[in-house]
Amino acid sequence: MHSSLVKSFVDDDTARRCTRALRDIPWHDERLRSLRPNVSGSGSAMIPSFVLGRNPRTGEALWYMHDPEFEECMGRAYEILAGAMRAHDPDFVFHQITLNKNVQYVQTVV
């Protein structure tokens, strides 16, 4: 999350809390990598990417949301980011937040 992008949606304190929460995530852990061809541009690239929150169909949290090694930082990241999203647009309904590390977003037009 680019800090100037965050600051355009939330106040400085919330932007700092979002940044801190994202920095506390153990991005180096290989278990937090996903195959994301729609994001990486390559069908075989594993990138640091995961979803925070619950499965909207089952209501269950993903394994790392309740794993003792990750639950504190992942729970904190979800609460802070979800709070920032709700502050920006209280009527927007969501169940999950997908994070991709160091990926340049390129909008494609269909």
Image (cartoon, rainbow, N blue to C red):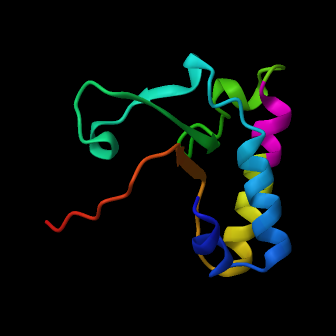
Q: Nearer the viewer, residue 33 or 53?
A: 33
Q: Is residue 64 visible?
A: yes
**Quadrant location, the C terminus:** bottom left
User: Residue 84's x, y, as percent?
Assistant: 73, 69
Q: Is 39 located above or below residue 16 in the figure?
A: above
75 falls in the magenta region: yes
Check residue 103 for magenta coloring.
Answer: no
- Figure check: 106 above or below 38: below
| Residue beneath the point at 78% across and 39% down | 24
Magenta stretch in the rendered image: 70-76
Left/right placement of residue 40 relative to residue 80 reads: left
Quarter that holds the N terminus: bottom right
**x then y, percent, for residue 48:** 51, 33
Q: Position of residue 15 (x, y in %)?
A: 75, 68
The residue drawn where x is 82% and y is 60% is 17
Number of numbered callouts drawn:
0
